[in-house]
């Protein structure tokens, strides 16, 4: 749908100080962020309308390139990026503000719970798992990384702790294991209906881990 547009905020002398894109009443919000207060309506100029999102991104980038950015010393706009999707070519000032904002951000317990609940029951696609596996092959974590991961898990409770399965689910899990027996190859064990290979023997073994 072509519901997007690009707009400019004008100074009293008629020159633009901010270029943006949006839809609906986006251009008329009294405060986009702490840096960009919206002017009175008479100084809000719709540059181009009836655009799809991709077209609005391209036109925003074009207009910012025309007027230039003050933080880069290339023009008169207070925009801190080149526009378009994402945060393209952010200035150091913008990067520092985002860093400080994230550094001091505290996530409430309710938000943490919602984040945890949103992950429950979700199954990653085979493509995602394969891609993730390939990225990790051959990589080893440093002691510092291991220490950080260990500390991040302190006090956390496994998401499925205390959750009881329905009787129907228990029955399905039980039926899925019927006829399966343990097999081992001398070092590892697995359950299967038949031997995984000629080197596998029936039965389960326990291998004591050495430090």
Image (spheres, grey):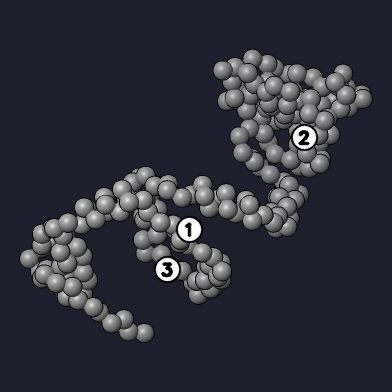
Secondary structure beneath dot 1 equals: loop
Q: Earlier in the sequence, mark 2 or mark 1?
A: 2
In this view, the residue in front, 143 or 10, is 143
Q: Residues within 10 Å of mark 1 (few under 14, many from 20)?
A: few
Q: Earlier in the sequence, mark 3 or mark 2?
A: 2
Secondary structure beneath dot 3 equals: loop
Figure quadrant of the C terminus: bottom left
Residue at left offset 81%, top offset 26%: 9
- Rendered view: 185 above or below 40: below
Whole-percent x, y for residue 41 in the image: 85, 20
Whole-percent x, y for residue 155 in the image: 56, 69
In this view, the residue in front, 90 or 128, is 128
Q: CA distance from mark 3 to mark 2?
A: 43 Å
Residue at left offset 69%, top offset 56%: 106
Residue at left offset 26%, top offset 50%: 172
The residue singled out by tag 1 in the image is: 159
The tag on residue 140 is: 3
- The answer to whether residue 171 is visible is yes
Q: Picture quarter containing residue 99?
A: bottom right
Whole-percent x, y for residue 187 in the image: 21, 75
């Amino acid at each position: 749908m072509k519901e997007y547009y690009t707009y400019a905020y004008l100074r009293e002398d008629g020159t633009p100080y901010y270029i943006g894109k949006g839809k609906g009443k986006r251009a008329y919000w009294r405060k986009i962020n702490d840096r960009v207060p919206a002017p009175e309506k008479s100084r809000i100029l719709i540059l181009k309308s009836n655009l799809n999102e991709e077209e609005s991104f391209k036109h925003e980038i074009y207009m910012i390139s025309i007027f230039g950015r003050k933080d880069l010393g290339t023009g008169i706009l207070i925009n801190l990026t080149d526009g378009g999707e994402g945060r393209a070519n952010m200035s150091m000032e913008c990067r520092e503000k985002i860093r400080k904002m994230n550094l001091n951000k505290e996530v409430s317990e309710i938000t943490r719970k919602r984040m945890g609940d949103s992950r429950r029951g979700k199954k990653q696609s085979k493509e995602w798992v394969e891609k993730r596996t390939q990225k990790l092959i051959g990589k080893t974590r440093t002691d510092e990384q291991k220490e950080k991961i260990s500390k991040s898990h302190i006090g956390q409770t496994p998401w499925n702790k205390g959750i009881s399965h329905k009787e129907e689910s228990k029955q399905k899990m039980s039926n899925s294991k019927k006829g399966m027996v343990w097999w081992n190859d001398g070092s590892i064990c697995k359950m299967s209906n038949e031997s995984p290979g000629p080197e596998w023997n029936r039965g389960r073994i326990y291998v004591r881990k050495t430090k």
